[in-house]
Amino acid sequence: MLKDKRILLCITGGIAAYKMADVASMLVKEGADVHVCMTENATRFIPAETFSVLTKNKVYTDVFDENPDDYVNVPHISLGTSADLIMVAPASADIIGKIANGIADDMVSTVVLPARCPILVSPSMNTYMYENRIVQDNIEKLKKYGFKIIEPASGHLACGYDGKGKLPSPEELVESIIYELAEEKDLAGKKILVNAGPTQENIDPVRFITNHSSGKMGFAVARAAANRGAEVTLVSGPVNLKTPLGVNRINITSAEDMFKEMTAKAADSDIIIMSAAVADYTPENTADEKIKKSEKDMAISLKRTHDILKTIGSEKKDDQIIVGFSMETENVLENSRKKLESKNADMICANSLRTPGAGYQVDTNIITIITREDETELPLMSKYDAANKILDKVLTLKQDKNVIE
Ligand code: CTP
């Protein structure tokens, strides 16, 4: 996701510096060209050689370090000016104070000054140090100057205290770089409403009716849309997935809850993408107490839920784009095309439960994008890539609508 992106990791002296080895390695795996500079104190927690081996690039620890392969560019200037993104992590109170006040007396504080790219700063220190008003003022100053601050996590700190000040996990740090850098921000200014996951329809306090949806497709759509700069609201049924960075998540349980949240937010959305597997039926009555078994068989009477896509489709505004999903086990395209009309959607993403690599639980999908104009059969790909293809098509439809208006 970060192919050909040049990322500079600036590491300062904190125990969490060891986590940056994972960050460097993960960035390399994402295709990035990773460069590292460290303060002298950082090298006391993790040696520079760890990073030169992982990144295959020279690591800089001193402003007078030279690059023997390049005497044209001066590293303390060129490292910052050539980067697509700089991440200062862990950022000690000392480096935050130096950057906020324009002090450049070591390699890290020096390289950030001439940089023109986005700079992410991830403070990591003792809770009381972090809460200190001077440190907080310096952080505010960095925000004012356009630095992006990554909130420290809370938990047990190496100094023995419990509280805020932990460096977020390597996965979270890499995700914040992906969020910033991986995609073009072609959905900036757009409000996108996505739903995902199954619903649960209670029979009694112990049992419920649900389906196999993992929510992965909808979460991939929300993540891709947020990475492309959209303002994303994700209404999710009960799933075991992390909220993508920058996404406003609303958790619901039943089809009725999903209906209420989606219809309340639909009118204010530019694009609505409905990948949730909403129950079509719910028990007519939900017992207040656990239903006790008897010797006889039993039947549960079910009533219809609202068709949320159909409701939102019937109230669609001219400039809105509405995307539905269609999960079928037979006559996939024929049944999906019908849903385009019956639900007044602009696009239906058809996927077959029977095709290996597609459907519930897995990280890949095989989708056919159906619109009124054409059909695009996508090959097997990750749900994230499929989400981007869907969003590409949505943008084309949106541009066509704007041209017609
Ligand atoms: N959908 C919805 N509300 C429902 C059921 C489905 O909004 N009560 C939406 C889904 O989120 C999806 C689309 O409708 O975007 C198609 O869902 P699918 O389950 O494939 O089809 P159904 O409309 O439920 O029809 P059937 O189950 O008969 O195939």
Image (spheres, helix red, strand yellow):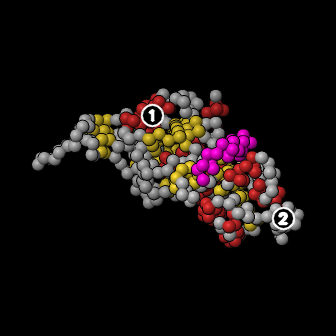
In percent of the image, x 74 and y 42: which residue is there?
A: 145
**Which callout, 1 or 2, points to the residue nearer the camera?**
2
Q: Is residue 127 above or below residue 272?
A: below
Residue 139 can be seen in this image? no
Q: Nearer the viewer, residue 277 or 93?
A: 93
The amino acid type found where label 2 is placed reads: Phe
Mark nearer the N terminus (1 vs 2): 2
Asked whether residue 103 is in view, the answer is: yes
What is the CA distance from the residue labelled 1 to the residue labelled 2? 58 Å
Q: Residue at x 67, y 54 (%)?
A: 92
Q: Secondary structure at mark 1?
A: helix
What is the magenta segment's predominant secondary structure? helix
- 10 Å neighbourhood of mark 1: few (<14), some, or many (≥20)? some
Q: Which residue is mark 1?
A: 261
Residue 143 part of the magenta-drawn span: yes
Query: What secondary structure is marked by label 2?
Result: loop
User: Is residue 135 rendered magenta in the image?
Assistant: yes
Identified at 64% across, 28% down, the residue is 405
Residue 79: percent from left, percent from top: 78, 59
Q: Looking at the image, do the residues carrying marks 1 and 2 touch, with CB atoms under 8 Å apart? A: no
Residue 64, which numbered label? Answer: 2
Q: Quadrant of the N terminus?
A: bottom right
Q: Position of residue 173 (x, y in %)?
A: 61, 55
Closest to the observer, 374 or 237 = 237
Amino acid at dot 1? Glu
Instruction: Give the residues in magenta.
Output: 126-147
Image location of residue 31, percent across then percent down:
66, 62
Residue 83 lies left or right of residue 127; in this view the side is right
Of the pair 383 and 252, the residue shown nearer to us = 252
